[in-house]
Each structure stands twice: as C-alpha cells, then as structure tokens.
Amino acid sequence: MATRLDGRELAAAIETRLAATIAAHQPRLGRPPGLAVLRVGDDPASGVYVANKEKACGRVGIRSLGAHLPAATEAEQIRARIEALNADPAVDGILLQLPLPGGLDAAPLLMALDPAKDADGLHTLNLGRLLKREPGPRSCTPAGVMALLARAGVELAGRRAVVVGRSILVGQPMALMLQAADATVTVAHSRTRDLPSLTREAEVLVVAAGRPRMLGAEHVRPGAVVVDVGIHRRPEGGLCGDVIVEEVEPLAAAITPVPGGVGPMTVTMLLVNTVVAWCRRHGLEHGLGDLVP
C-alpha cells in the first residue's frame, strides 16, 4: 500500500516556521506581512479557497487585506484596484483569484500586478524567472508539490517524470520545476495519443488534468510516486481527484490524498511567497530558501 504524502501535516509545519519568522521581524518593521486576495464574482469553489486563505493568514500572523468584488465589475475597475494594491505599502502579496467571471480576461489583469507582489508567480516576468531559474515568486500549487516530494525524500535527479496537464497555473510551471530538479520531464495533455503507455513510464506522475477520476491502474507504473492535483465535488457527495485512488493506491509507492494532499500546500505556499516578499522588501533573512529560490 502506498505511503500517503500528507499535505496537512507539512503545511502545519511550514506555518509554524512562518509564524516564527513574522514574530522575529515584526517588532523591527512595525507591521506584519500583508496579503490581498482579490475575488471577483461568486464562484463557490473560489469562496471556499479564499476563506481557507484568510484563516491561514490569521494562524501565522499575516494581515488579510483582500476584497470581494461583484461579478459585474468591469476590467478597468479591477485593474484600478490592483494598481491601488501595488502602491499600498502595507501589501506584500497580491492574488487575483481565478477563475474570473465570464467576459473577463485574466491575462492583462495578471500583467497589471507588481511582479514583486505577485503572490502566485503568474506574472509573465515571474514565469520567465522560473524558466531561467532566477529567484522570484513561484506558482503555489507546483511549489507545494515540490515541497511535498522533498519532505518525502523523493529523489528527482535523473528520474522520469510525466505531468498530465499543461495549464499555466499548474502543468507548465510544474514541468519547469521538475526540470530544474534534474528530472527528465514529459508533458501530456488532452490530445496526447495512447496516454497510458506514456504515463506508465513515469517514476513520478503528476496529474493536473482537471477531470475527475481520469487516470486509473492502467496508467500507473508499479512503484511510481503519484501526485493528484485535482479536486472535484462528486454528485453523490464527497470529494475526489483526477486519479481513481482505489485502483492506483495499491500500485503506487506514494500518493497524495484528496483532500489533504496538494490543496493545503497550495494555500501554505501563498503564505510563503508573501512572507518572503515582506522580508525581501526590507532586506531581511527569511530562512525559507528550501521552499523558494
């Protein structure tokens, strides 16, 4: 039976480190780190995510400075709010919660973010820094996956990794982070032919396809490490991932549970990016170099 890669446990340990870093520097700086999560519309999943992020901020001592805007808010109004947050000295991290309501293009709004305050590493400049292996904020979900793999002692150098999914939010930055760790990486997607033959080659398989229970036993090499990024609400109740866990878990050496695997790490890495930005603005050591470059 596979070892479960517990994201809740690791997230709690990282939160303890973040709280200690904030407590050490706040007396000198006179303020805590500030994170602004900008939510537009009433997507139910986004509401849950934002609430979890606000609770996590409270646990470590980050000031939550976000806003919830109506779905009918125009792009120029959102951009003006982003520019105000860019200029606000109390804000160290900004997250534009995705997806946006229909009719709004995320790309120009993400480009409006101050790259130094881009808490999810999605600004073009920060994606370029990732590609060039330069320091900068990293996309939270793949960074959380890397932290989970490191905590479990998963050796990546020289190993064959397959990422299923090519979104700019997860799949593409995930592949770049695995490459930076010297894995040999293949990216699969909806048009990949004979997906099982490809994924069965993977020693490390990251599934971020966005389709519930898409991959089963026929997709997995015995002894592989399987990371399930997906999370979906099932019609009959409960949550599931992109992986058919009851088929895959007996084959895998390690697997992330859903819920409790990647999800908590996504939230925690958002906090990490915010605290690191706070420290960098003031030229202070953060001691989190094992989590971000």
Image (cartoon, rainbow, N blue to C red):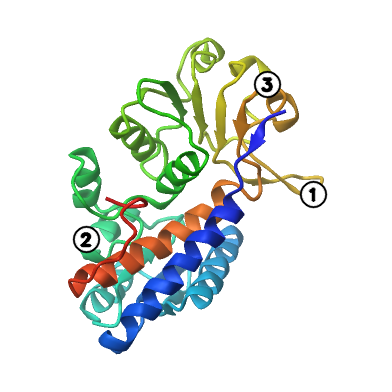
**Distance Cα–Cα, label 3 vs label 2:** 42 Å
Viewer can see residue 100: no
Q: Mark 1 to mark 3: distance in Å?
A: 26 Å
Q: Residue furthest right?
A: 236
Is 64 placed above or below 227 here?
Answer: below
**Callout 2 amino acid:** Pro
To which residue does mark 3 refer? 251
Gap between marks 1 and 2 measured at Cα: 40 Å
| Residue 44 can be seen in this image | yes
Q: Residue at x 36, y 50 (%)?
A: 139
State the image coordinates of residue 125 (x, y, percent, origin top left). Answer: 19, 51
| Residue lying at 63% horizontally and 25% vertically, measured from the top left | 252
**Residues at badges 1 and 3 in contact (C-beta under 8 Å)?**
no
Q: Nearer the viewer, mark 1 or mark 3?
A: 3
The answer to which of marks 1 and 2 sits earlier in the sequence is 2
Q: Earlier in the sequence, mark 1 or mark 3?
A: 1
Residue 173 % position (x, y): 34, 40
Judged left or right of residue 147, residue 49 is right
Q: Secondary structure at mark 3?
A: loop
Residue at the spot of label 2: 115
Mark 3 residue type: Leu
Q: Quadrant of residue 224?
A: top right
Residue where numbered disc 1 is placed: 237
**Which numbered mark, 3 or 2, is in the foreground of this view?**
3
Q: Position of residue 1 (x, y in %)?
A: 72, 28
Q: Residues within 10 Å of mark 3 (few under 14, many from 20)?
A: many
Picture residue at 54% right of the left edge, 41% below the top:
229
Mark 2: secondary structure: helix
10 Å crowding of disc 2: few (<14), some (14-19), many (20+): many
Q: Hey, what amino acid is under mark 1?
A: Gly
